[in-house]
């Protein structure tokens, strides 16, 4: 590419960063790194009424947790700063004034009540009200296209509320290009004259993002499908200013696991999965929302499954490190159709990444989350983790899978008792106690050799010995290898547990 690639992720700080926003950030990051470019974070806080305290910090922490940090943004490499639109508002008025001076935009003084009346009148006549070429100069609407220059100036000096509207062209066909969706043709007659600037001194998203993208030298705008209807206006604004437009790519929606529509927090609450990277508590309502981090997901798993929501490498490979994603990622391989969110697939990814973690690291996390493990040697906990992590998806699964390594069974599974306990079980278990007691070198291999040898030599069914033995050690007919359990808990504890079972028979 002739220019250095520069992309931006531009969220609004109106609440926690939805997983769909993280996917947008990820695709921007991958594209930038693939082309040795810059990944810019810009905070689009022009809507001060919806601003939420703490949301910007949450966005930054989420990106860092996911391992997709921005190169340039608030407080970091501010070459084109500031990066909060509220701190750039002095810039936007001059561009709105430029468009007005060149006849490409105009002041509109219509009140919301007047516009509402126009809409209702049109509805009554079976029509749709659109503020554009069709009616902007007929005299029914109050704007600088029908007012004299003196009348317009008088309203401005009197402090009347106004907006600046873009003057959409009439009878033109706009040819647009989207990297993902291809060529798009738009009849400009159907476009409304969008508001660019308000009398409170703040621009709308449409003006601010165009000006900022130009001034920050953004080469590619990669954003959600919901902005596709705005593409025509944005291209017209670039043309109006005489600027080269960046290339555009509109990502597909992330859809609900079932039914129609895009994924929402309500879907996560209903089906039991988070839709935010980190936990969030709303500062106004104190409503708490779950996060992937707090639910026990590894950031690598989150990034891996998000990459597959709308993108396909064209191969059978599903597990990708971030470096592999950077190498494989291409916008041309992003789908147009919405990507259905699959909660079970996210768990599958997490299970995989669980197996890649160091046992000692998992042991420390496990120990930190369970008060019953205080004072136990972390190296012992790591040995336990090695035996059970294959069956775990989250660290929170560990206790259920391993409690018997730390505490003796307080009771026994009833189904297990019915299945394992026979008339001669007590006698067989006494023999097992003798063999265990006589085993000097208490290793997995020795225990296995001696017990299995005795069972085979005496023609005893393996289940008649191994099922009650497992029940004695675990409390249920489940768990890892019996001989591994015996070795881990030691000879004395093994004997104690077998004796405890015998007493209940």
Image: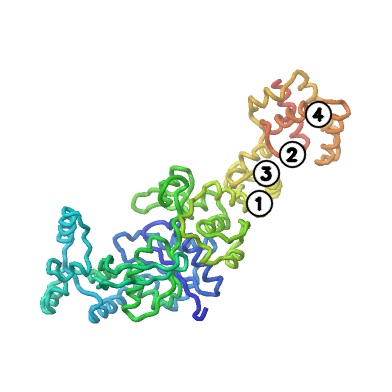
Which residue has dot 1 on it? 355
- Asked if the residue under mark 2 is in contact with the one under mark 4, i.e. CB atoms within 8 Å, the reply is no
- Asked if the residue under mark 3 is in contact with the one under mark 1, i.e. CB atoms within 8 Å, the reply is no
- Asked if the residue under mark 4 is in contact with the one under mark 3, i.e. CB atoms within 8 Å, the reply is no
Whole-percent x and y of residue 201? 25, 71
Query: Which corner quadrant holds the C terminus?
Result: top right
Q: Assess disc 3: are there few (<14), some (14-19) or many (≥20) residues with their C-alpha within 10 Å of its C-alpha.
A: some
Q: Marks 2 and 3, how far apart in space? A: 10 Å
Q: Quadrant of residue 425?
A: top right
Whole-percent x and y of residue 143? 16, 71
Give whichever of 193, 437 is nearer the camera.
193
- Residue 481: assigned label: 2
- Residue 388: assigned label: 3
* Vertical comparison of 11 with 368: above or below: below
Which residue has dot 4 on it? 432
Q: Assess disc 1: are there few (<14), some (14-19) or many (≥20) residues with their C-alpha within 10 Å of its C-alpha.
A: some
Q: Assess disc 4: are there few (<14), some (14-19) or many (≥20) residues with their C-alpha within 10 Å of its C-alpha.
A: many
* Vertical comparison of 257 with 312: above or below: above
């Amino acid at each position: 590419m002739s220019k250095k690639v520069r992309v931006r992720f531009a969220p609004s700080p109106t609440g926690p960063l939805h997983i769909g926003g993280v996917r947008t950030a990820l695709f921007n990051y991958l594209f930038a790194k693939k082309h040795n470019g810059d990944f810019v974070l810009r905070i689009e806080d022009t809507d001060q009424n919806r601003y939420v305290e703490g949301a910007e910090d949450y966005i930054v922490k989420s990106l860092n947790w996911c391992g997709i940090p921005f190169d340039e943004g608030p407080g970091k490499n501010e070459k084109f700063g500031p990066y909060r639109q509220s701190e750039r508002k002095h810039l936007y008025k001059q561009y709105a004034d430029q468009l007005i001076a060149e006849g490409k935009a105009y002041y509109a003084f219509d009140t919301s009540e007047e516009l509402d009346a126009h809409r209702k009148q049109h509805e009554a006549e079976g029509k749709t009200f659109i503020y554009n070429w069709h009616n902007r100069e007929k005299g029914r609407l109050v704007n600088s296209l029908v007012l004299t220059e003196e009348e317009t100036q008088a309203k401005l000096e009197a402090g009347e509320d106004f907006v600046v509207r873009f003057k959409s062209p009439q009878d033109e066909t706009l040819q647009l290009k989207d990297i993902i969706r291809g060529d798009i043709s738009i009849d400009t007659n159907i476009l409304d004259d969008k508001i660019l600037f308000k009398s409170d001194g703040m621009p709308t998203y449409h003006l601010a993002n165009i000006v900022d993208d130009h001034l920050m030298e953004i080469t590619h705008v990669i954003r959600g499908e919901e902005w596709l209807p705005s593409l025509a206006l944005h291209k017209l604004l670039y043309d109006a200013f005489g600027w080269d437009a960046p290339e555009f790519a509109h990502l597909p929606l992330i859809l609900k696991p079932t039914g129609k529509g895009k994924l929402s927090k309500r879907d996560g609450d209903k089906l039991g999965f988070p839709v935010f990277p980190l936990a969030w508590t709303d500062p106004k309502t104190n409503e708490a929302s779950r996060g992937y981090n707090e639910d026990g997901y590894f950031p690598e798993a989150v990034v891996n499954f998000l990459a597959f929501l709308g993108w396909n490498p064209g191969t059978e490979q599903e597990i990708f490190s971030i470096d592999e994603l950077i190498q494989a990622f291409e916008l041309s391989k992003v789908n147009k159709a919405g990507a259905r969110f699959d909660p079970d697939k996210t768990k599958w990814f997490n299970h995989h990444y669980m197996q890649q973690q160091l046992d000692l690291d998992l042991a420390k996390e496990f120990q930190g989350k369970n008060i019953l493990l205080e004072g136990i040697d972390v190296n012992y906990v790591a040995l336990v983790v090695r035996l059970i992590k294959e069956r775990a998806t989250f660290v929170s699964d560990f206790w259920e899978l391993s409690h018997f390594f730390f505490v003796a069974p307080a009771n026994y599974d009833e189904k297990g008792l019915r299945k394992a306990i026979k008339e001669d079980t007590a006698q067989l278990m006494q023999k097992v106690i003798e063999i265990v007691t006589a085993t000097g070198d208490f290793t997995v291999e020795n225990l296995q050799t001696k017990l299995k040898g005795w069972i085979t030599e005496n023609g005893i069914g393996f289940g008649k010995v191994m099922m009650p033995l497992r029940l004695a050690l675990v409390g249920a007919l489940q768990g890892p290898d019996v001989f591994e359990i015996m070795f881990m808990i030691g000879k004395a504890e093994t004997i104690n547990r077998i004796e405890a079972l015998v007493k209940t028979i």
